[in-house]
Image: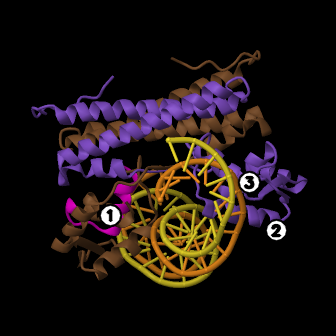
Chain colours: A brown, B purple, C yellow, D orange
DNA sequence: TCCTACATGTAATAAGTTACATGATTAC
DNA sequence: GTAATCATGTAACTTATTACATGTAGGA
């Protein structure tokens, strides 16, 4: 899975501009994919060059021109080929978990601050996803709702552990071991 | 956070070879970081060149020579600098969530198969992490245990959603909406 | 006045992956 | 005999990021 596959997937739903695509990345897909404009526009350019999508320029009043891209039959075939390709393992990389892992070389105050930051960020992302879920739950397909559920449950679990971690680090820590919550 | 920072962090705990480092990636750190030999060895080479670590060659019987790397004072300073640097946002990219998201363009059988594969992979990873937790819970620092807890709770939440998703997709799906589990 | 939203794109750079290259030992 | 483990490394390639470059309209 790479930027091109996601772009094709989004264009399966109807014509969109690069800007539209980036918006969807940021909101609905943010729990499993994100990419900058620097990857969206080159992806669109390449897809157009290989005949997967076609461009149409739409003049707008008061706003810059919009380049609407529409998926072609070839593009749809390409997307089906992606779905038939072997599934890739998830990729997760976390700076905050690294800092926790090597936590004994740093200060507890830093750790608490990072956990608090991480928690509020995740609370924000969770709320955003919940809004998407509530708004589209009657329109989205069951598997799409499962994908969003996955993101929400994930964030909830993370928030919970982070809160427990903060509580523990803020406590006197009386040299008892961190007990695994049930 | 990049490979170099993680390598330095691991060498803070004592001298290690490139092979040792890759092993630790795969087991203890696998829930938030992984990288191939193609990143470990170049990282070590660069760190040695810049004086962060020093190499010592250890002859072994029946096995290839081992290159043990030890962190220097400069390296420790560099690691502290990493800890003082601004924290990076997590990076998560998931092929299976993308396929669920665009699930209506594929077959339900594929989705179920992918979810089942994803589940067993996560069950394996969870068991691996639980073993690490059990084995080292009396030796690891509290923040390190929080980091492992994070991974375990995360996998558990993911497994649960995936199971619910499978159940739903396997049911008759009587056109009822996917209900958000409490 | 300044920030945000709208809107498109390129160039230089960074970071890491995959495949290649080698080779002994041990367990099944 | 063949797969896995131990052990080190390089070169070509892929992919995406960051910073740059430009400009309008509307709201606070």
Residue sitting nearer the eye, B30 or A28 = B30
Residue A4 is drawn in which quadrant? bottom left
Please identify the quarter of the rendering in which residue A102 is found: top right
**Given this view, does label 2 or label 3 mark the residue nearer the observer?**
3
User: Residue B120 in the image: x percent, y percent?
Assistant: 38, 37
Q: Residue at the spot x=40%, y=35% of the render? A: B158
Q: Nearer the viewer, mark 1 or mark 3?
A: 3
* Structural crowding at the residue carrying mark 1, measured as other residues with C-alpha within 10 Å and reported as few (<14), some (14–19) or many (≥20): many
* Residue pictured at 37% horizontal, 72% vertical: A43
Pointer 1 with pointer 2, Cβ within 8 A: no
Report the Cα–Cα distance between label 1 and label 2. Answer: 40 Å
A121 inside magenta stretch: no
> Residue B62: which disc?
3
Q: Nearer the viewer, residue A125 or C22?
A: C22
Q: Which residue is mark 1?
A: A5
Chain ID of residue with mark 1: A
Q: Can see residue A65?
A: no
Q: Residue at x 61, y 28 (%)?
A: B133
Q: Is residue B78 above or below residue A53?
A: above
Task: Please identify the quarter of the rendering in which residue A152 is found.
Answer: top left
SS at circle 3: loop
């Amino acid at each position: 899975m790479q930027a091109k596959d996601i772009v094709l997937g989004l264009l399966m739903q109807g014509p969109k501009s690069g800007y539209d695509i980036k918006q969807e990345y940021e909101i609905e897909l943010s729990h499993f994919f994100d990419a900058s404009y620097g990857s969206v526009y080159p992806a669109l350019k390449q897809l157009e060059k290989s005949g997967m999508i076609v461009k149409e320029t739409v003049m707008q009043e008061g706003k810059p021109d919009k380049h609407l891209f529409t998926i072609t039959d070839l593009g749809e075939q390409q997307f089906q080929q992606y779905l038939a390709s072997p599934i890739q393992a998830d990729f997760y990389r976390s700076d905050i978990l690294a800092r926790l892992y090597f936590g004994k070389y740093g200060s507890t105050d830093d750790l608490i601050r990072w956990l608090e930051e991480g928690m509020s960020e995740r609370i924000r992302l969770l709320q955003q996803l919940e809004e998407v879920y509530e708004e589209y739950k009657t329109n989205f397909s069951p598997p799409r709702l499962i994908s969003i559920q996955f993101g929400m449950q994930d964030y909830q679990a993370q928030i919970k552990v982070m809160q427990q971690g903060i509580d523990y680090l803020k406590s006197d820590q009386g040299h008892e071991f961190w007990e695994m919550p049930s």
